[in-house]
């Protein structure tokens, strides 16, 4: 007997992880409209952008303005990505009280990017943790390339454990396992999900999948069977994988909602509203995206003649 959850939580990451991969730059007002419409459609957690150096990610250069201009709704968590204390200071000034730190589980990737091991990168976040604690900011962590990296292949669970332990040492107890490269498979997701929940019961877990090789929704199903009920997803399936040029991006929010609703699993989202948002996003970027529901429609749209 499979134990399906009655409900899952879907964090909308489109305003950050989706838009940052698009060549076209969205205006502040366009971003604000997308955030507000997504919240109206049912999002209870939304990643509004990142507070990083504008030269590093030009698409996120105006996150400060977006955060100040958007209307907040009680009960909704507005979070943003930061890389250092300066990013936390900007987040605080913009009224954002939830920030996410990210580190690669891949040692090869981490050493290539920063000349530091994943554990050393997390230890370097200690100043961020101290600042957050003193300024009422809640931190979460994202462990990218958690399931695989092209140079290394599958990332061993023991390596993931080590990064998790490093995060816990600086006081971060909400973490996501992120399939940045789209290399995760359902069996691996089930195994990793069960094991991290068992070994670190004090950690709240998210899973973050890309649909690079068409296994995104299958991985969500495996994650649910492993007992994890919180997922990141992106409107219209925007995004990409820097290690697989031309690959599709994040799992599409509307696809996850549709699957769950067909299975009788609640999400708090209005599916039709999210489909409308996805179509408007496609119109704004001027190209199709990897969203099955935007391409084929809902099951309930099918009529038998």
Image: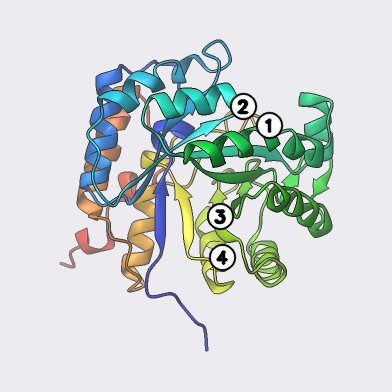
Q: How far apart are marks 4 and 3 (CA)?
A: 7 Å
- Asked if labels 3 and 4 touch by Cβ distance under 8 angstroms, the answer is yes
Q: Nearer the viewer, residue 88 or 8?
A: 88
Residue, far left: 305
Mark 4 element type: helix
Nearest-to-viewer mark from 3 and 1: 3
Q: Earlier in the sequence, mark 2 or mark 3?
A: 2
Residue at figure coordinates x 23%, y 48% from the top left: 41
Q: Are the residues tagged 3 and 1 within 8 Å (C-beta)? A: no
Residue receiving disc 1: 243
Q: Is mark 3 on a helix, strand or loop?
A: strand
Task: Indicate whether 220 appears above or below 213.
Answer: below
Return the residue found at the far front: 134
| Residue 237 vs residue 4, the one in the foreground | 4
Q: Name the residue under label 2.
A: 84
Circle 4 or circle 2, nearest the eye: 2
Q: Residue 286 in the image: state x and y as whole percent.
A: 33, 22
Considering only order in the chain, which callout, 1 or 3, is on the residue closer to the N terminus?
3
Q: Residue 199 carries which label?
A: none
* Disc on the earlier residue, 4 or 1: 4
> Residue 112 placed where, x, y %?
81, 26
* In this rendering, position of residue 158 left or right of residue 186: right
Residue plotted at (40% across, 34% down): 96
Please tell me which residue is depicted at 58% across the width and 34% down the height of the picture.
Answer: 131
What residue is shown with label 3? Answer: 207
Residue 301, picture quadrant: bottom left
Q: How crowded is mark 1: few (under 14 residues within 10 Å), some or many (20 or more)?
A: few
Q: What element carries label 1?
A: loop
The CA span between labels 4 and 2 is 30 Å
The circle drawn on residue 223 is 4
- Mark 3 burial class by Cα count in 10 Å: few <14, some 14-19, many 20+: many
Give the farthest residue toward the bottom: 1
């Amino acid at each position: 007997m499979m134990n399906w959850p009655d409900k899952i939580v879907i964090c909308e990451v489109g305003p950050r992880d989706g838009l940052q991969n698009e060549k076209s730059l969205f205006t502040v007002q366009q971003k604000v409209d997308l955030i507000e419409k997504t919240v109206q459609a049912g999002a209870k957690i939304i990643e509004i952008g990142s507070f990083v150096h504008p030269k590093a990610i030009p698409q996120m250069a105006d996150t400060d303005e977006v955060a100040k201009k958007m209307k907040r709704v009680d009960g909704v968590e507005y979070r943003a990505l930061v890389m250092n204390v300066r990013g936390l200071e900007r987040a605080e000034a913009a009224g954002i009280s939830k920030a996410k730190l990210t580190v690669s589980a891949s040692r090869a990737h981490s050493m290539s990017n920063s000349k530091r091991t994943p554990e050393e990168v997390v230890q370097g976040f200690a100043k961020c943790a101290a600042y957050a604690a003193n300024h009422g900011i809640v931190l979460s962590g994202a462990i990218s390339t958690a399931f695989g990296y092209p140079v290394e292949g599958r990332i061993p669970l023991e390596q993931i454990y080590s990064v998790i332990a490093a995060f816990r040492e600086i006081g971060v107890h909400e973490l996501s396992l992120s399939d940045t490269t789209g290399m995760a498979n359902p069996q691996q997701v089930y195994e990793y999900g069960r094991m991290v929940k068992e070994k670190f019961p004090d950690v709240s877990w998210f899973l973050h999948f890309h649909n690079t090789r068409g296994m995104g929704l299958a991985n969500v199903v495996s994650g649910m069977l492993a007992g994890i009920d919180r997922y990141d997803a992106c409107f219209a399936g925007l995004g990409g994988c820097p290690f697989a040029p031309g690959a599709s991006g994040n799992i599409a929010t509307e696809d996850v909602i549709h699957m769950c609703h067909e299975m009788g699993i609640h999400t708090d989202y209005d599916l039709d509203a999210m489909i409308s948002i996805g179509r408007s996003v496609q119109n704004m970027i001027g190209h199709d995206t990897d969203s099955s529901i935007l391409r084929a429609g809902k099951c309930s749209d099918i009529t038998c003649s």
